[in-house]
Structure formats: C-alpha cells, structure tokens
Amino acid sequence: MADIADTLTGKSDQLDNVDLIAGPRDFTISAVEVNAGGEQPLVIHLAEFPRPWKPGLTMRRIIAAAWGTESEEYVGRRVRLYRDPAVQFGKETPGGTRISHMSHLSK
C-alpha cells in the first residue's frame, strides 16, 4: 500500500488553519519580518513549522496589545495557535488561525 501522508499538505507558503485541524499547537517565534503596507504586513517564522505564520489584522492587534509593537522582541516568545472554523472572510466561512495562549504576559 502507498502512504498518502505527503499528499495531505496544501500548496501554501504559510501556516493555514487546516494545518491545525488536529488541535492547537505551541510554537516558538524564530524570526519576524515586517512589510509595512504589503498585503501580508507581518510574517512570523516558527521554529517548529516549515512555513511562516502570517497573522491577520485581529491577531496582529492582539500581539501588539500583549507584547508591544517592537517586533524584534517577539523572537523566542511562544504562542499557542488553534483553528477556529467560525472565522468568516466576506460571505465565506473558511475558518482561521487564532491565538489561545502567549508567553511573556505580565498579567
């Protein structure tokens, strides 16, 4: 029998919510790129995953509220990400990636 495991990964350049379908995962931030004004203004590289996470506006606002706006401070910090199937994009409900836990919180 042939193993289909290699066929289960989507053709994407980023972590997608379907990558979290098995449940939440913890990640360590290894690098951050800021592309102000770009379609994907924040690219977060994860030590435990081969593709970066490109958080949407709401998740960027949560990160800034929790950790501040200096992206170099994020390296080494940890986030737990999960798939939220209720996330809407326009009239579609494709699901989305959400943060449930973050390290380095003062409260």
Image (spheres, rainbow, N blue to C red):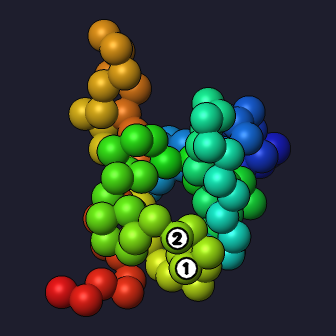
Mark number displayed over residue 70? 2
Q: Residue at the far left: name it.
A: 107
Q: Residue at x 62, y 60 (%)?
A: 44
Label 2 SS: loop
Check if mark 2's residue and mark 1's residue have beta carbons within 8 Å.
yes
**Image position of 101 with respect to 43: above or below:** below
- Residue 78 % position (x, y): 48, 79
Q: Residue at x 30, y 25 (%)?
A: 88
Q: How far apart are labels 2 and 1 at the CA level?
A: 6 Å
Three-letter code, disc 1: Glu
Q: Badge 1, how many Cα within 10 Å: few under 14, some, many 20+?
A: few
Q: Which residue corresponds to mark 1?
A: 73
Mark number displayed over residue 8? none
**In what quadrant of the picture does the N terminus appear?**
top right
Q: Quadrant of residue 87?
A: top left
Q: Is residue 87 left or right of residue 26?
A: left
Three-letter code, disc 2: Glu
